[in-house]
Image (spheres, rainbow, N blue to C red):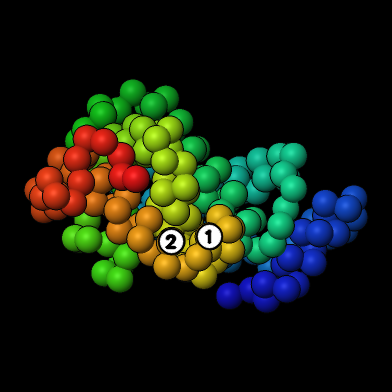
Amino acid sequence: MTDPTHVTRLLMDWRGGDANALDDLLPLVYEELRRLAARHMAGEADGHTLQPTALVHEAYVRLVDADIEWQDRAHFFAAASRVMRRMLVDHARSKGRQKRGGGRARVTLHAADAVTPPPDLDVLALDEAMEVLAQEDPRKARAVELRYFGGLNLEEIAEVTGVSIATVHRDLRMATAWLMTRLGADDAPGDDESGDTPPS
């Protein structure tokens, strides 16, 4: 784990126009970006044409070019996670994979956050469900993205989203239940837990 204070300082310097800060930042965040990429690609089939190293490099380039008001380390990795997820979804679509049965992505839900254990989820079907959730309840969708794709802990998610840790925990439980029901998981919660309407 990198020093959050150091990363945050470099992000602030970078935003302030210090080009050298960018050179100093990459070595500090590279290994964590690789772990993030591996997390995103954990469920991809062997021989996937987009490799973790390429995912890291392309995501970093996009982050460098993006006009983002960086806040801190957690914000940086949250943005990196979103970029990586979007790249994998775009890659799956470009390959013309079927919505179900191909391009599977495994999402590890922790017992403390989730209602029930997760299935293996098709990356495109999951993305469609996440888009619906984001339209109806952006905060819950953001919590799911940060936790299960970005690997942020509850405290970091609370910091990024500006809500309490208890709210993050509740959002994750409700959103997880709704996503699993929508995706037709065999072990999804009953109708009292979730349904076709995004959680509120």
Q: Which residue: 66% across, 40% down? A: 62
Tell me, yes or no, if residue 50 can be seen here.
Answer: no
Amino acid at pointer 2 = Val
Q: Earlier in the sequence, mark 1 or mark 2?
A: 1
Q: Which residue: 24% across, 51% down? A: 177
Q: Position of residue 105 (x, y in %)?
A: 31, 47
Front-lying residue, 10 or 88: 10
Q: Position of residue 183 (x, y in %)?
A: 21, 40
Q: Residues within 10 Å of mark 1 (few under 14, many from 20)?
A: few
Q: Position of residue 131 (x, y in %)?
A: 40, 34
Q: Which residue: 69% across, 68% down? A: 28
Q: Position of residue 185 (x, y in %)?
A: 15, 46
Q: Which element is circle 2 on? A: helix
Residue 163 marker: 1
Q: Is residue 28 left or right of residue 161?
A: right
Where does label 2 land, which residue?
Answer: 168
What distance separates the C-alpha of mark 1 from that of mark 2? 7 Å
Residue 182 marker: none
Determine the image quadrant of residue 78. Answer: bottom right
> Quadrant of the image for the C terminus?
top left
Q: Number of marks in the image?
A: 2
Vertical order, 121 against 154 (above or below): above
Amino acid at pointer 1 = Val
Q: Which element is circle 1 on? A: loop
Q: Is residue 87 left or right of residue 115?
A: right
Vertical order, 129 against 141 (above or below): above
Label pair 1/2, CB-CB below 8 angstroms: yes
Q: Residues within 10 Å of mark 2 (few under 14, many from 20)?
A: many
Tell me, yes or no, if residue 58 can be seen here.
Answer: yes
Q: Is residue 164 left or right of residue 39?
A: right
